[in-house]
Amino acid sequence: MPVEVTWWGHATCTIEESGVRLLTDPLFASRLAHLRRRRGPLPPPEAAVADAVLVSHLHADHLHVPSLARLAPGTRLIAPAGASRAVPGLSRLGLSITEVRAGDTVEVGALRVRAVPARHDGRRLPMGPHRSPALGYVVEGGARTYFAGDTGLFDGMADAVGPVDVALLPVGGWGPRLGLGHLDAGRAAQALTALGALSAVPVHYGTYWPIGMDGVRPHEFHAPGEEFVRHAARLAPKAVVHRLGHGESVRLEAGQ
């Protein structure tokens, strides 16, 4: 069964398989705090149509309440444990919230969504001390599609995630520096090698950039996708990298 992936920008993707439509970390804003969308149009209304939404962690560029408010009432929201307590606005959106931890599974139509660990600070910053895990998700149907969210490399990553066919991997960020708990293009290629996926889509780059920093190391904004292609060709030569433009889609068969 083929899987279709559409990249809307940043970490926002639509994954479609077996008649089920999943949306990841929706961010439909032209501006978020000090960040401005500098590439790609805002996603169209149909981007907010989903059977379920996967939220990887509670940072505002991944759990964005105004973007979640665009979902139809009753849409299922799968989010890390503690999300409702840490982000009280979630409970006012009329969504069906399922909170999960690594190892939990959720059935969405014909698909099985498995929460897997991530190496990242998953708290809602700067709003308080409530702990909430950062997660990735593996969508299992005819293909196994891994959405990494935000993560760094960690010991046992391949075992925790398991074998996958398609990997949606973050390769950059929204500033000139990436701290701990992130993948840059090189580390994302290492993750691809460890996971053994034969198809990869780079995400989390080339969309948002801090206001006033347009002239500061601009290559950090534009380059991660191309750098990931180069690193993946060297480290994971059997894998095919699909570097999508904003709003573009790719249709893949398991094993491609």
Image (cartoon, rainbow, N blue to C red):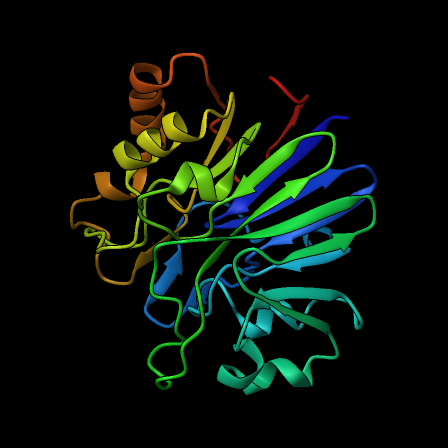
Q: Is residue 77 left or right of residue 173?
A: right
Is residue 87 something that shows in the picture? yes
Can you tell which quarter of the image residue 164 is in? top right
Q: How many marks?
A: 0
**Residue extending furthest toward the top:** 238
Q: Position of residue 106 (x, y in %)?
A: 71, 56
Q: Position of residue 248 (x, y in %)?
A: 59, 34
Front residue (pair 156, 249): 156
Residue at 54% over, 58% down: 25
Instruction: Locate the N terminus and report the quarter of the image it occupies.
Output: top right
| Res 15 quadrant in image | top right
Query: Is residue 247 visible in this depiction of the protein?
Result: no
Pick the front one: 48 or 62: 62
* Residue reaching furthest to the left: 216
Location of residue 178 in the rendering, given as x and y in whole percent from the top left corner: 23, 52
Tell which of 224 and 146 is nearer to you: 146
Residue appearing at x 54%, y 64% in the figure: 101
- Which image quadrant: the C terminus? top right
Residue at 79% from the left image edge and 73% from the top image edge: 73
Left or right of residue 94, residue 123 in this image: left
Image coordinates of residue 110 in percent, x first then y, are: 82, 44
